[in-house]
Amino acid sequence: MADRTETEKRDLAKELAAAVRGEVSFAAADRALMTMDASNYRRVPRAVVAPRDAEDVAAALRVCREHGVPVVPRGGGTSIAGQATGVGVVLDFTRHMRRIVSLDPAARTAVVQPGVILDDLRAAAGAHGLTFGPDPSTHSRCTLGGMIGNNSCGSHSVAWGTTADSVRELELLTYGGERVRAGRGTDPTGAPTGLPPRLRNGVKALVDGELALLRTGYPDLPRRISGYALDALLPEKGTDLARALTGSEGTLGVLTEAAVRLVETPAARVLAVLAYPDESAAAEAAHTLLPHGPMTVEGMAADLVGDAAGLPKGGAWLFVEMGGASPGEAAARAQALCRAAAADGSTDHTVVTDPAGQRALWRIREDASGTATRLSDGSEAWPGWEDCAVPPAQLGPYLRDFRALLTQHGLRGTPYGHFGDGCIHIRIDFDLLTPPGIRRFRDFSYDLGELVVAHGGSLSGEHGDGQARAELLPKMYGPELVRVFEQFKSLWDPAAGLNPGMLVRPARLDENLRFEVLPSRPVPVEFGYPHDNGDFSAAVRRCVGVAKCRNTTTGPGSTDVMCPSFRATGEEQHSTRGRARLLHEMLAGEVITDGWQSPEVHDALDLCLSCKGCRSDCPVGVDMATYKAEFLHHHYEGRVRPAAHYSMGRLPQWLHAAAPLAPALNVLARTPLAAVAKRLGGIAAERPIPRLATETFARWWWRRRRGTAGGAGGLSGGGTVTGTGELSGGRTTAGAGSPSDARTVILWPDTFTNHLSPEVGRAAVRVLEAAGLRPLLPPTAPLRQPGGALPQPVLPRLHRPPLCCGLTYVSTGQLDRARTVMRRTVEVLSPLLQDGHPLVVLEPSCAAALRTDLPELLSDDPRAARLASSVRTFAQALEELAPDWQPPRINRPVAGQTHCHQHAVLGDAAERRLRARAGLTGQLSGGCCGLAGNFGFERGHYDVSVACAEDQLLPAVRESAPGTEILADGFSCRTQLDQLSDRPGRHLAEVLAEALGEGA
């Protein structure tokens, strides 16, 4: 039997490869990437095919039909009901079939292929003042084919309806190979237009025979997505076959092209945010706003929004967008709506006219599908009843009953969503890991299905039925109409080859759950994973598939970082979601079978820049940089590592040893010997070796302090200095500045500042002192032994290991070494930080490592958490300890990039405020510079590194005006600019220090 299966697999692979011009893959990695969508479900496909055009689709269908293999069409994979998963051949339309075939502004139509990203269509239409009306929160990565398959909606559906309202004509291929051009109207026989003979007769006979049922069996509400929309084939509704096929979830035909309607977008938009005491009050009020002609009426409660700025005081809010021909008209309409809302229960309101402010608030709503997966106490919450809808006037009573049902089943969740259309989204804290929890999930689903129907609603109001709800369709439509659905499916797909198990004859809603394959017990790991109770499986489960990491472009004003390698390559395996999927399958052990030794996971993680962007930009906080470090640790445990791990991963110790030889090494780095050294060290040939400082920052510091104190044994600014020039914790004279002084800061001499850019450290010292602060460098050995005794005689400074945050060891997965250097750092710094002094770190990547990696690797040491909490950036220290200091006015525009680690871990609000006070105007770009520490130096990464720099950093610098100050606080960012542009970047401290000099 096994031999026969292998033979069939080889034959299928051979025939598909011969017939299809696009990519055909049976590889474990490609199959693993397609096992899940954004739902609770998982299925393992046999193969993945990326067709180049409709002819490729036809060829793939023919081969699969001959082998009896099912086919699943797939777009962006953001479906929440399981319909983008399958066990046969997955057709991936996102690789090639993503062309906008034509766009007619006069007719307000566009013709698109199924893989077109919604935002790409909106951008093309926007040039003509048009847009595509439906706009789900995944608009930056969902495809038109997926939207048509699910009949997607979005926040503007109160104005522009569902996708079905925007579809004009569809071109499809059935599993049997028949071509269909579905539109509106009938042919001379009275059958829907565009059907081949077999379907023409069958569809007409089915509709004619069930006219009464089709006229009475459907609830009347704006968000009725469940089931097949066969009522669109009624003569009084225009016999609209395109509309009837929209929302069929790839079960009837494979879409190859679509003609869609575009709508005129208002010249101006204003966002009115209305506050209510609670979500029930907001739900009751939502439908009363519809007569005012809003474009959106979105609802959210306090437990989802958190401490977001810009919201009026309340327990729940309605986000209502009003359009107008001018900003004044839109604002006037918004104010009128607010007055009407105040008379009908709204307790407060705010009107946001600033586009940046509107984007910030809309981001809260768009990220909700991810943020709602973690409740306030950190509990996991899942889809499953994500989008049921009721008539808008019934939303208030329905929501109260819904809350009561949650309580009855001992479940929790946070409703939000399209209140104006009666559609709510919610993630619920189902236990989908144990049999009792799964039984509760099933029981609750049945009870909720009855509740939705009792309120005249639809089981799905946006995302389709898939496997999540199709089992319950008889509750909504009754057995007779469901039988008609089955007959319709049999007409189109008698072999049941298209997306079987969806919509009709479905699998049970509690089968194929994606969690059942994961280990039942936590796997041994190195990091503490504090947000996941130390469970690596729970950390990997964080990825629910909303795929924000698949954004290919950044919007106006965006500072997002995630995911630079995906934007550079366009490959799913190089997205955060793709890597998380591969880790999931590695833990499952079914498709990815080599565990921590998996080459598939290694290859996917190889292009992860460890930028940490996903830690902040992913709505569910996936932290792929940490997962990569964890994987590399286990992958190379007891094995020889790549050369770059020894050269770049252990950079701090090499630089420390090389410091006395810096002048000679700088000369050698410009000779042919450098090429040999780079080859041996696994360094990209294209990369020049950075110059070493001939005087390290620490040496400059101690030389300066000795000169100030009058000798090697004199006083420094915070204790006695030993013969080697280090703080030893002795008493100081009055006025010298003791470590207990409230204005004392501990300045961290990170590896990059110390050995590669000491000018940054010198500039920071000057600015900190000008602000009245007293910076001190830490010693390289503990001030006192554990028993309180003074330290024993120390080795000469050259032979002592340097203090280190452990960053380079972590990024290369050398976690044992990282833990060793981190423990030493904790030992040395803990006594100095006991009085609450901040640890000022100039290099953002080192600050992020001390803030996050150190406490998560040393989770057993409470001192690690205290050290992490003491970390401050340069600007944060100035703001907190010298709030009245006025920086010099520079009055220049800026360009450059916020360091990706700062964006993800530390935030840059203090930096932005400091720049503003100094007259440095403009916004820094987001993204990642692409060098990313060791990543861009490693052999094989150069092209991707450059592509990442070209995403945002280099264009921003090139487009800046002459005289613009180029800011880059990270050494990697400055190095990338030095090597790829003619506009060098500087640390903010350097710019301020230079201005202090000019003032003097």
Image (tube, rainbow, N blue to C red):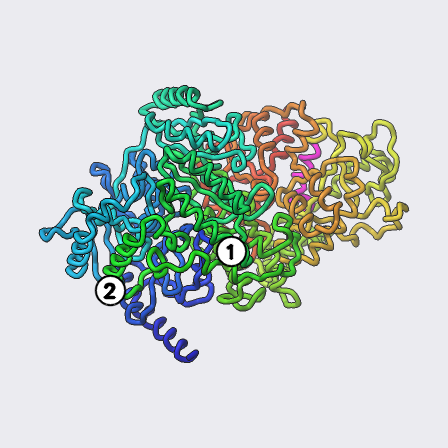
Q: Give the residues in magenta.
A: 753-766
Q: Amino acid at mark 2?
A: Gly
Location of residue 271 with respect to 526 vertically, above or below: above
Membership of 873 in magenta stretch = no
From the image, tell me which residue sits under label 1.
Answer: 438
Q: Tag 1: Cα neighbours inside 10 Å, few (<14), some, or many (≥20)?
A: some
Residue wearing tag 2:
176
The secondary element bearing badge 1 is classed as: helix
Quick check: 877 above or below 616? above
Question: Is residue 255 or residue 428 the one in the foreground?
Answer: 428
Can residue 979 be seen by looking at this rendering? no
Q: CA distance from mark 1 to mark 2?
A: 38 Å
Res. 252 image quadrant = bottom left
- Residue 177: x and y in percent read 23, 63
Q: Nearer the viewer, residue 6 or 164?
A: 164
Residue name at image x 58 percent, y 41 percent = 376
Compared across the picture, whether 426 is left or right of 503 comes to right
Task: Give the dominant element type of the magenta stretch: helix, strand or loop.
Answer: helix
Q: Position of residue 646 (x, y in %)?
A: 65, 60
Q: Position of residue 225 (x, y in %)?
A: 33, 46
Residue at 37% in and 44% down:
453
As drawn, the residue found furthest toward the right would be 789
Determine whether the residue tagged by mark 2 lies in a helix, strand or loop: loop
53 vs 806, nearest the viewer: 53
Crowd tier of the residue under label 2, counting other residues whose Cα lies within 10 Å: few below 14, some 14–19, many 20 or above:
some
In this rendering, would 847 be left or right of 824?
A: left
